[in-house]
Image (spheres, rainbow, N blue to C red):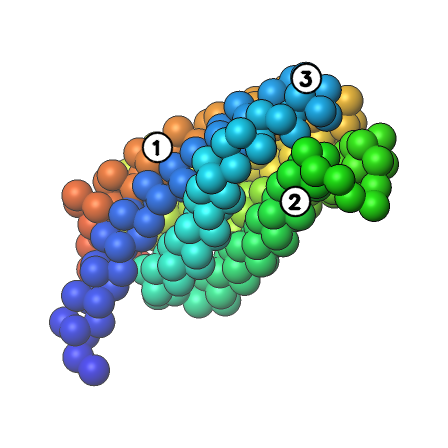
Amino acid sequence: MTAAVVDRSQKAYARFAGMMYFFTVFDFTGVAIVSRLTGNGTFLEAAHSIAAAETLYRIALVCGVVGNLSTILLAIALYVTLKPVNVNLAMTALLFRLAESAIGAVVVALGFATLQIYLDANSPTGFDRHQLGALADLVSHTSAAATDISVISFSVGSTIFFYLFLRSAYIPRPLATWGLLGSLLCMFAFVASLLVPQSSDVLRGIGALPIGVAEPVVGLWLLTRGVDPERLQRLSYGHI
C-alpha cells in the first residue's frame, strides 16, 4: 500500500471520527428522556408516567444503544487516525473506549430491566409495590455506578486520544489541550462521584461539561478540515 493511499485512508477515518463525535447526542437525548419521564416523584408516580409513555421510554433506551455503537465506530476511527503517532497508546485508548461501550451496554440492559419493574407496578404481579420500589432503587443505583465506571473508562481513553492529537498537531493545539484537560476533569469528577455519592449529580455536571463542549467542536474541525498526515512527519524532522 502506497503512502498516498495510507494518507487518504487516514484522512477519511479522521473525517468519519468527526461525524461520529456528533452521535454522542443520542446518549444525551436518551438520558434526558429517561430523566424527564422518571421525574423526582415517588416510585408509583414514576411508574404511572412511564407506563403512559412506554414507547418514548423504549426510544430513549434505543438511543443509548445507538450511542454505544457509535462509540465503537468513533474509537476505531480515532485509532486509525492516531496510530501513526504512537500505535501502542492509540491501541490503549481504543481498548478503554471499547470498555466504555461494553459497560454502557450493560447500563442499557439495566434500563430495560428497570422499565419492566415500572410496568409491573401497574399490573398484578407476585411482588407488591414496596418490593418493586426497592428493586427499582437497587437496579437504579447499580446502573448509576456502572455509568460512572463507563464514563471513567471513556475519560481515560479520551485523555490518551487527545494527548496524541496534541503530540501530532493534527488539530489546533488549544483544541487538543481543551480536550485533554476536559477528559482529565471528567475522570476525576466521576471517580469522586463514586467516592462521594451524595454529591454525585453536582460532580457529574461539573465534570462532563468541558469535554461535552469540546467533543462537538473537535468533531466539527475533523469533519470540515480533517488532518494532515504529513504534518507529523514535518514535526518529526523539525520543519514546523
**In this view, which residue lies farthest toward the top?**
41
Q: Amino acid at mark 3?
A: Gly
Q: Which one is in front in this view, the residue at disc 3 or the one at disc 2?
A: 2
According to the image, label 1 marks what residue? 174
Badge 1 amino acid: Pro
State which quarter of the image contains the N terminus: bottom left
Residue 29's image quarter?
top left
Relative to 82, is 120 on the left or the right?
A: right
Residue at x-position 61% and y-position 52%: 109
**The quarter of the displayed image where residue 234 is located:** bottom left
Reply above or below: 133 against 20. Answer: above
Q: Write down the residue under mark 2.
A: 116
When the figure is inspected, residue 14 is found, relative to residue 87, above or below; the finding is above
In-front residue for pair 118/29: 118
Indicate which disc, 2 or 1, sits on the residue closer to the N terminus.
2
Above or below 224: residue 51: above
Q: Can you identify the residue that label 3 sits on?
A: 41
Near mark 3 (Cα within 10 A), the count class, few <14, some 14-19 or many ≥20, is few
The residue tagged with tag 1: helix, strand or loop?
helix
The quadrant in which residue 37 appears is top right
